[in-house]
Amino acid sequence: MGRIIVTGGLGFIGSHFVNLLYTKTKSEIVIVDKMTYASNINNVKVPHVLIKKDICELTEGDLGQFEYLINFAAESHVDNSIKNGLPFVRTNVEGTYNLIEIARKNKNLIKFVQISTDEVYGDLDEYSSNTTSDESFNLNPSSYYSATKTSSDLLIISANRTYGLPYIITRTCNNYGENQHKEKFIPTIINSIKEGKDIPVYGDGNQIREWIHADDNAESIIKILFSEKINHIFNIGTNEIYTNNDLINMVGEILGKKINFKYVDDRLGHDRRYSLNSNKFISEFGEIQKIKLKDWMIRILN
């Protein structure tokens, strides 16, 4: 029986991935997680081995031999990166570097899968209104978060060129779904409306984002993981796009409650628009989206 390492597997997206991965493989699943505020051991419902450790401090001896390593571990809250970028540099850059060094020395390694973000492409509002970012699009990050994710992507690509590291990089849009941490945008909207609180909205609220359910993202990653594709970057998006204002109004409409907007000063360096071109993935593996955002909202709110 083989072994699959999943770093950050107790986090929101990582736990969705692990739960689905268990149904697709007979390999042993090993989760590596630092157990930060964003981790929740109760989110994982399937058998696994847990290593409680910072990815910066992992050693070859901790992991042993394995065939796949999927790196979900990351500092991901942009506001936090604006306040203090150092934890992002440590986890997202130094941590990824350490994982690469361990993985490239592993004789059984089939793939190193790096979970990245559409934010590495930067603000598409700087281009024409119909511009989308494919995998060859310029990397132009705007925050310490997106800059450190860009850096980790480039470390992996350089490790492939120098050492032959077999890799996949996925760049996905905004995720939503069950068990998402309350600090994220959709849980904040839902909880604020339910409790009759003002919803804090950056700037004019017309920032445009693309949304995918974490299960659809997880299934897409697994398709790539067990395919013959290697040394590729894949965008994973749905083309389901809303402004932040639209999203807030959707939740209010479903709940049948009055919405109290509180527009606040815009985030420093806030990107106005993201939009992925995911044709490369679709041509190889088929359609990505099974779960529609509004359908999911109706189901969980009612």
Image: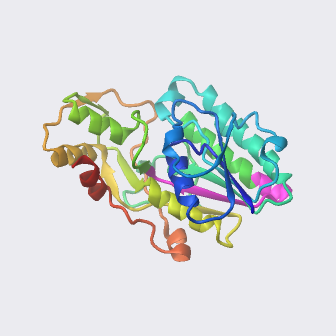
Q: Residue at x 48, y 64 (%)?
A: 277
Task: Assign the N terminus to one quadrant of the image.
Answer: bottom right
x and y percent of residue 118 in the render?
Answer: 51, 51
Give the magenta-colored segment's residue range. Answer: 158-174
Picture quadrant of residue 8: top right
Is residue 163 one of those drawn in magenta?
yes
Of residue 292 and residue 159, the one placed in the foreground of this image is 292
x and y percent of residue 197 in the render?
Answer: 22, 27
x and y percent of residue 97 in the render?
Answer: 75, 42
Please tell me how many numbered marks the rendered image carries: 0
Q: Is residue 133 visible?
A: no
x and y percent of residue 252 in the render?
Answer: 19, 43
Q: Is residue 62 left or right of residue 218?
A: right
Q: Is residue 48 above or below residue 68?
A: above
Q: Is residue 239 above or below residue 186?
A: below
Q: Residue at x 13, y 37 (%)?
A: 258
Q: Residue at x 70, y 49 (%)?
A: 154
In the picture as drawn, the residue positioned furthest to the front comes out as: 47
Picture quadrant of residue 93: top right
Q: Is residue 39 visible?
A: yes
Q: Is residue 121 above or below residue 287?
A: above
Of residue 162 and residue 50, the one placed in the foreground of this image is 50
Display coloring:
rainbow
Q: Is residue 261 left or right of residue 206?
A: left
Is residue 64 one of those drawn in magenta?
no
